[in-house]
Amino acid sequence: MNIITIILMATLVRTSVLMVSSPAFTANGYIPAKYTCEGSNINPPLKIDAVPPGTQSLVLIVDDPDAPNKTFDHWIVWNILNLREIPENTIPGAEGKNGSGKGGYKGPCPPTGIHHYHFKVYALNVLLTIVADSDKQAVEKAMEGHILAQGELVGLYKKAN
């Protein structure tokens, strides 16, 4: 292999960065109660920018690594076709099992203290062909080799009580 081949190979596997934001909360800011177990328990709106050419779908994984026993998955969604936004209170694609073993969005509801909620978005060059109600591990495995870009928005929440 020559140096040009190595550079080309490195360029092919590099992923770019998606810009993920929300009109409901700022990065590392507090998520409004409306989107939690103390409110309407609906998903917040998200905006996605810098989606690379060739993107066929998005994946969204929302999890809480501060959960007492292990990372808790709040929402797993794939085959999202709207590449610019995820509106509030929607089901934008196929939903997988959250940490409760059910499909759908489960809003922040920390037992104690302030928790960090990671809204991770992935741009893929394919639609995923996995069964509905797949868990995060199955989605992550199906994404392997297909991620063009990824980005993350972190929001905080602490119960009012």
Image: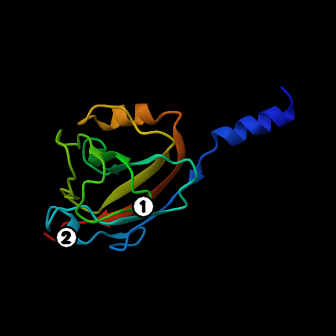
Quadrant in which residue 159 is drawn = bottom left
Q: Amino acid at mark 2?
A: Lys
Residue extending farthest right: 2
Gap in angstroms between the C-alphas marked 1 and 2: 18 Å
Q: Disc 1 designates what residue?
A: 153
Left/right placement of residue 3 relative to residue 44 reads right
Of residues 52 and 144, the one nearer the viewer is 52
Looking at marks 1 and 2 on the same chain, the residue that comes earlier in the sequence is marked by: 2
Q: Quadrant of the C terminus?
A: bottom left
- Left or right of 124: which side holds 1? right
Direction top: furthest residue: 1
Within 10 Å of the Cα at label 2, are there few (<14), some (14-19), or many (20+) other Cα atoms? some
For the N terminus, which image quadrant? Answer: top right
Residue 84: image location, x then y, percent: 44, 62
Picture residue at 38% right of the left edge, 56% below the top: 119
Question: Where 83 falls versus 77 (above or below)?
Answer: below
Residue under circle 2?
Answer: 34
- Please rate how many residues cluster around mark 1, counting C-alpha atoms within 10 Å: few if below 14, some from 14 to 19, many from 20: many
Q: Residue at x 20, y 59 (%)?
A: 112
SS label for mark 1: strand
